[in-house]
Amino acid sequence: MDRTQDYIADSLELHLFFARIMKEHAFFLKVGFLPPNTNLAKEGELFLRQFEGLLSRAIALSDRVVRCCVLDSGELFTEFTDRAECQTQRLTGTMIDSGLTARTMRLKGRDCNAELCVSQDLAQQVRRLNRDGLRLVERLITFKERLLCGVNSCSLFTSNYPLFIEHILREARLYRAHLMRLEGLARCSGQELRDSELFWNRIMMEHALFIRGLLDPSEDALINTADDFAADYKRLLDASASANDKTMRNCSALDLTQKFRDFKRTGVEGIEACQIRSLILPLLADHVLREANHYIRLLEA
Ligand SMILES: [Fe+2]
Ligand SMILES: [Fe+2]
Protein backbone atom coordinates (compact mmCIF):
# COMPACT_ATOMS: atom_id res chain seq x y z
CA MET A 1 0.00 0.00 0.00
CA ASP A 2 1.46 3.37 -0.92
CA ARG A 3 1.73 6.42 1.26
CA THR A 4 -1.40 8.16 -0.04
CA GLN A 5 -3.46 5.07 0.70
CA ASP A 6 -2.10 4.93 4.24
CA TYR A 7 -2.68 8.64 4.68
CA ILE A 8 -6.32 8.37 3.62
CA ALA A 9 -7.15 5.28 5.68
CA ASP A 10 -5.26 6.48 8.77
CA SER A 11 -6.94 9.89 8.62
CA LEU A 12 -10.47 8.55 8.27
CA GLU A 13 -10.00 5.90 10.97
CA LEU A 14 -8.68 8.63 13.26
CA HIS A 15 -11.70 10.88 12.67
CA LEU A 16 -14.25 8.09 13.06
CA PHE A 17 -12.89 7.44 16.54
CA PHE A 18 -11.79 10.88 17.74
CA ALA A 19 -14.43 13.17 16.18
CA ARG A 20 -17.03 11.03 17.97
CA ILE A 21 -15.05 11.19 21.21
CA MET A 22 -14.73 15.00 20.88
CA LYS A 23 -18.43 15.50 20.19
CA GLU A 24 -19.20 13.51 23.32
CA HIS A 25 -16.74 15.54 25.39
CA ALA A 26 -18.54 18.67 24.18
CA PHE A 27 -21.81 17.02 25.15
CA PHE A 28 -20.60 16.12 28.68
CA LEU A 29 -19.30 19.65 29.18
CA LYS A 30 -22.54 21.17 27.88
CA VAL A 31 -24.80 19.22 30.22
CA GLY A 32 -22.53 19.85 33.24
CA PHE A 33 -23.18 23.61 33.47
CA LEU A 34 -25.65 25.41 35.73
CA PRO A 35 -27.77 28.52 34.90
CA PRO A 36 -25.01 31.16 35.54
CA ASN A 37 -23.04 29.51 32.74
CA THR A 38 -25.62 29.26 29.99
CA ASN A 39 -23.17 30.87 27.58
CA LEU A 40 -20.61 28.14 28.20
CA ALA A 41 -23.33 25.52 27.74
CA LYS A 42 -24.14 27.12 24.38
CA GLU A 43 -20.48 27.08 23.42
CA GLY A 44 -20.30 23.40 24.37
CA GLU A 45 -23.35 22.67 22.24
CA LEU A 46 -21.82 24.50 19.28
CA PHE A 47 -18.73 22.27 19.52
CA LEU A 48 -21.01 19.25 19.72
CA ARG A 49 -22.73 20.24 16.48
CA GLN A 50 -19.45 21.09 14.74
CA PHE A 51 -17.91 17.74 15.61
CA GLU A 52 -21.08 16.03 14.45
CA GLY A 53 -20.54 17.79 11.11
CA LEU A 54 -16.90 16.68 10.97
CA LEU A 55 -17.82 13.10 11.85
CA SER A 56 -20.55 13.11 9.19
CA ARG A 57 -18.01 14.14 6.53
CA ALA A 58 -15.60 11.41 7.69
CA ILE A 59 -18.33 8.76 7.53
CA ALA A 60 -19.29 9.85 4.01
CA LEU A 61 -15.73 9.15 2.79
CA SER A 62 -15.10 5.94 4.75
CA ASP A 63 -17.10 3.19 3.06
CA ARG A 64 -14.74 0.40 1.88
CA VAL A 65 -11.81 2.66 2.74
CA VAL A 66 -11.33 2.08 6.48
CA ARG A 67 -10.09 -1.31 7.65
CA CYS A 68 -12.38 -4.07 8.94
CA CYS A 69 -10.25 -4.42 12.07
CA VAL A 70 -11.14 -0.83 13.05
CA LEU A 71 -14.84 -1.20 12.28
CA ASP A 72 -14.99 -4.45 14.26
CA SER A 73 -12.92 -3.25 17.23
CA GLY A 74 -15.80 -1.73 19.20
CA GLU A 75 -14.05 1.65 19.34
CA LEU A 76 -16.49 3.39 16.96
CA PHE A 77 -19.69 1.89 18.35
CA THR A 78 -20.69 -0.97 20.62
CA GLU A 79 -23.85 -2.98 20.95
CA PHE A 80 -24.87 -0.39 23.58
CA THR A 81 -24.18 2.88 21.75
CA ASP A 82 -27.54 3.33 20.07
CA ARG A 83 -29.50 2.77 23.29
CA ALA A 84 -27.04 4.86 25.32
CA GLU A 85 -27.56 7.81 22.96
CA CYS A 86 -31.31 7.46 23.06
CA GLN A 87 -31.46 7.25 26.88
CA THR A 88 -28.94 10.07 27.34
CA GLN A 89 -30.90 12.35 25.02
CA ARG A 90 -34.07 11.65 26.98
CA LEU A 91 -32.36 12.18 30.36
CA THR A 92 -30.60 15.44 29.46
CA GLY A 93 -32.91 17.01 26.88
CA THR A 94 -29.94 17.58 24.56
CA MET A 95 -30.31 16.20 21.06
CA ILE A 96 -27.87 13.54 19.92
CA ASP A 97 -27.71 12.73 16.22
CA SER A 98 -28.05 8.95 16.36
CA GLY A 99 -28.11 8.86 12.55
CA LEU A 100 -24.31 9.16 12.71
CA THR A 101 -24.13 5.94 14.71
CA ALA A 102 -26.50 4.15 12.31
CA ARG A 103 -24.39 5.28 9.34
CA THR A 104 -21.16 4.19 11.04
CA MET A 105 -22.66 0.77 11.75
CA ARG A 106 -23.53 0.38 8.05
CA LEU A 107 -19.97 1.08 6.85
CA LYS A 108 -18.26 -1.72 4.94
CA GLY A 109 -14.63 -2.35 5.76
CA ARG A 110 -11.61 -3.24 3.69
CA ASP A 111 -9.27 -6.14 4.37
CA CYS A 112 -5.99 -4.89 5.78
CA ASN A 113 -4.07 -6.12 2.72
CA ALA A 114 -6.62 -5.17 0.09
CA GLU A 115 -5.68 -2.45 -2.39
CA LEU A 116 -7.46 0.85 -1.95
CA CYS A 117 -8.64 2.68 -5.03
CA VAL A 118 -7.32 6.19 -4.45
CA SER A 119 -8.65 9.09 -6.44
CA GLN A 120 -7.06 12.52 -6.38
CA ASP A 121 -10.42 13.86 -5.29
CA LEU A 122 -10.59 11.56 -2.24
CA ALA A 123 -7.09 12.56 -1.15
CA GLN A 124 -8.03 16.24 -1.43
CA GLN A 125 -11.23 15.79 0.54
CA VAL A 126 -9.32 13.98 3.29
CA ARG A 127 -6.75 16.77 3.37
CA ARG A 128 -9.51 19.34 3.77
CA LEU A 129 -11.11 17.22 6.49
CA ASN A 130 -7.81 17.02 8.38
CA ARG A 131 -7.21 20.76 8.12
CA ASP A 132 -10.76 21.55 9.28
CA GLY A 133 -10.47 18.96 12.06
CA LEU A 134 -7.22 20.48 13.21
CA ARG A 135 -8.70 23.98 13.40
CA LEU A 136 -11.75 22.70 15.25
CA VAL A 137 -9.82 20.63 17.79
CA GLU A 138 -7.48 23.61 18.41
CA ARG A 139 -10.53 25.66 19.36
CA LEU A 140 -11.91 22.87 21.55
CA ILE A 141 -8.55 22.63 23.33
CA THR A 142 -8.64 26.37 24.05
CA PHE A 143 -12.21 26.01 25.37
CA LYS A 144 -11.23 23.13 27.68
CA GLU A 145 -8.16 25.06 28.90
CA ARG A 146 -10.38 28.03 29.72
CA LEU A 147 -12.79 25.82 31.66
CA LEU A 148 -9.95 24.20 33.56
CA CYS A 149 -8.62 27.64 34.54
CA GLY A 150 -12.07 28.67 35.76
CA VAL A 151 -12.56 25.49 37.74
CA ASN A 152 -9.06 25.59 39.25
CA SER A 153 -9.55 29.19 40.40
CA CYS A 154 -13.03 28.34 41.79
CA SER A 155 -14.67 30.95 39.56
CA LEU A 156 -16.59 28.29 37.67
CA PHE A 157 -18.70 25.41 38.89
CA THR A 158 -19.56 22.39 36.79
CA SER A 159 -20.68 18.88 37.64
CA ASN A 160 -17.60 17.56 35.80
CA TYR A 161 -14.54 16.84 37.94
CA PRO A 162 -11.47 19.07 37.35
CA LEU A 163 -9.53 15.86 36.60
CA PHE A 164 -12.17 14.97 34.01
CA ILE A 165 -11.57 18.28 32.22
CA GLU A 166 -7.81 17.68 32.34
CA HIS A 167 -8.37 14.15 31.04
CA ILE A 168 -10.49 15.16 28.05
CA LEU A 169 -8.02 17.96 27.35
CA ARG A 170 -5.22 15.38 27.03
CA GLU A 171 -7.36 13.27 24.69
CA ALA A 172 -8.00 16.33 22.51
CA ARG A 173 -4.26 17.08 22.41
CA LEU A 174 -3.59 13.51 21.29
CA TYR A 175 -6.09 13.94 18.43
CA ARG A 176 -4.33 17.16 17.46
CA ALA A 177 -0.89 15.50 17.63
CA HIS A 178 -2.07 12.70 15.31
CA LEU A 179 -3.53 15.20 12.86
CA MET A 180 -0.33 17.24 12.84
CA ARG A 181 1.68 14.09 12.19
CA LEU A 182 -0.61 13.16 9.27
CA GLU A 183 -0.40 16.67 7.84
CA GLY A 184 3.39 16.77 8.24
CA LEU A 185 3.21 19.85 10.41
CA ALA A 186 5.90 21.04 12.77
CA ARG A 187 5.00 19.85 16.24
CA CYS A 188 4.55 16.29 14.99
CA SER A 189 6.85 14.69 17.51
CA GLY A 190 4.51 15.70 20.32
CA GLN A 191 4.92 14.16 23.75
CA GLU A 192 1.44 12.68 23.30
CA LEU A 193 2.66 10.43 20.50
CA ARG A 194 5.87 9.25 22.12
CA ASP A 195 4.55 6.65 24.47
CA SER A 196 1.06 5.65 23.56
CA GLU A 197 1.01 2.94 26.21
CA LEU A 198 1.88 5.32 29.00
CA PHE A 199 -0.78 7.70 27.73
CA TRP A 200 -3.56 5.10 27.59
CA ASN A 201 -2.63 3.42 30.88
CA ARG A 202 -3.06 6.78 32.56
CA ILE A 203 -6.36 7.32 30.74
CA MET A 204 -7.57 3.89 31.90
CA MET A 205 -6.50 4.59 35.48
CA GLU A 206 -8.44 7.84 35.44
CA HIS A 207 -11.53 6.10 34.02
CA ALA A 208 -11.40 3.77 37.03
CA LEU A 209 -11.15 6.82 39.32
CA PHE A 210 -14.08 8.58 37.61
CA ILE A 211 -16.22 5.44 37.78
CA ARG A 212 -15.52 4.98 41.49
CA GLY A 213 -16.29 8.65 42.14
CA LEU A 214 -19.54 8.69 40.17
CA LEU A 215 -21.01 5.48 41.55
CA ASP A 216 -23.59 5.85 44.29
CA PRO A 217 -21.87 5.44 47.69
CA SER A 218 -24.07 2.39 48.31
CA GLU A 219 -22.52 0.49 45.39
CA ASP A 220 -19.59 -0.73 47.50
CA ALA A 221 -18.76 -3.86 45.51
CA LEU A 222 -18.43 -1.93 42.25
CA ILE A 223 -16.52 0.86 44.00
CA ASN A 224 -14.02 -1.68 45.36
CA THR A 225 -13.53 -3.25 41.93
CA ALA A 226 -13.01 0.19 40.34
CA ASP A 227 -10.49 1.02 43.09
CA ASP A 228 -8.62 -2.21 42.33
CA PHE A 229 -8.41 -1.33 38.63
CA ALA A 230 -7.12 2.15 39.45
CA ALA A 231 -4.45 0.62 41.72
CA ASP A 232 -3.45 -1.95 39.05
CA TYR A 233 -2.99 0.76 36.41
CA LYS A 234 -1.07 2.86 38.90
CA ARG A 235 1.30 -0.07 39.48
CA LEU A 236 1.69 -0.51 35.74
CA LEU A 237 2.48 3.18 35.31
CA ASP A 238 5.04 3.11 38.13
CA ALA A 239 6.62 -0.03 36.66
CA SER A 240 6.83 1.36 33.13
CA ALA A 241 8.49 4.51 34.44
CA SER A 242 11.45 2.37 35.45
CA ALA A 243 11.33 -0.91 33.51
CA ASN A 244 12.73 -1.45 30.04
CA ASP A 245 10.98 -4.69 29.18
CA LYS A 246 8.35 -3.41 26.78
CA THR A 247 7.02 -6.88 25.96
CA MET A 248 6.26 -7.58 29.59
CA ARG A 249 4.52 -4.22 29.91
CA ASN A 250 2.48 -4.85 26.77
CA CYS A 251 1.34 -8.21 28.04
CA SER A 252 0.13 -6.98 31.38
CA ALA A 253 -1.44 -3.86 29.88
CA LEU A 254 -3.41 -5.99 27.42
CA ASP A 255 -4.46 -8.46 30.06
CA LEU A 256 -5.52 -5.74 32.48
CA THR A 257 -7.34 -3.70 29.84
CA GLN A 258 -9.29 -6.74 28.64
CA LYS A 259 -10.47 -7.30 32.21
CA PHE A 260 -11.24 -3.60 32.62
CA ARG A 261 -13.14 -3.66 29.29
CA ASP A 262 -15.30 -6.52 30.64
CA PHE A 263 -15.98 -4.52 33.80
CA LYS A 264 -16.94 -1.47 31.74
CA ARG A 265 -19.17 -3.59 29.51
CA THR A 266 -21.02 -4.93 32.54
CA GLY A 267 -21.24 -1.34 33.72
CA VAL A 268 -22.94 -0.04 30.56
CA GLU A 269 -25.30 -2.98 30.64
CA GLY A 270 -26.21 -2.32 34.26
CA ILE A 271 -26.62 1.42 33.75
CA GLU A 272 -28.80 1.00 30.64
CA ALA A 273 -30.94 -1.56 32.47
CA CYS A 274 -31.23 0.74 35.55
CA GLN A 275 -29.54 -1.83 37.77
CA ILE A 276 -26.67 0.38 38.96
CA ARG A 277 -27.11 3.52 41.04
CA SER A 278 -24.79 6.28 39.87
CA LEU A 279 -24.25 9.73 38.37
CA ILE A 280 -22.98 8.11 35.17
CA LEU A 281 -24.88 8.91 31.98
CA PRO A 282 -25.31 5.85 29.72
CA LEU A 283 -23.36 7.65 27.00
CA LEU A 284 -20.41 8.24 29.37
CA ALA A 285 -20.38 4.54 30.28
CA ASP A 286 -20.32 3.61 26.59
CA HIS A 287 -17.71 6.30 25.83
CA VAL A 288 -15.16 4.84 28.28
CA LEU A 289 -15.88 1.33 26.98
CA ARG A 290 -15.07 2.46 23.43
CA GLU A 291 -11.82 4.04 24.61
CA ALA A 292 -10.82 0.71 26.21
CA ASN A 293 -11.64 -1.06 22.93
CA HIS A 294 -9.49 1.45 21.06
CA TYR A 295 -6.56 0.86 23.40
CA ILE A 296 -6.94 -2.93 23.11
CA ARG A 297 -6.75 -2.67 19.30
CA LEU A 298 -3.56 -0.63 19.60
CA LEU A 299 -2.05 -3.17 22.00
CA GLU A 300 -2.97 -6.08 19.76
CA ALA A 301 -1.60 -4.48 16.59
FE1 LIG B 1 -12.90 10.62 26.27
FE1 LIG C 1 -11.20 8.99 28.47
Image (tube, rainbow, N blue to C red):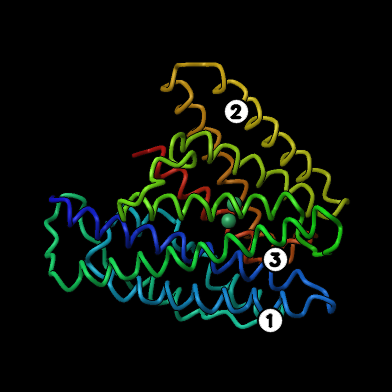
Earlier-in-chain disc, 3 versus 2? 2
Find disc 3 in the rendering and name its residue. Answer: 281
Query: Quadrant of residue 274 in the image?
Result: bottom right
Q: Residue at x 34, y 69 (%)?
A: 129
Cβ atoms at labels 3 and 1 below 8 Å apart: no
State whether residue 265 appears in this view: no
Q: Secondary structure at mark 3?
A: loop
Find disc 2 in the rendering and name its residue. Answer: 237
Earlier-in-chain disc, 2 versus 1? 1
Residue 133: % across, % down: 42, 66
Crowd band around label 1 with a 10 angstrom C-alpha radius: few (<14), some (14–19), many (20+): few
How many angstroms separate mark 2 from mark 1 (CA)?
38 Å
Q: Considering only vertical position in the picture, is 296 above or below 148?
A: above
Amino acid type at circle 1 is: Arg
Residue 29: % across, % down: 68, 67
Find disc 1 in the rendering and name its residue. Answer: 90
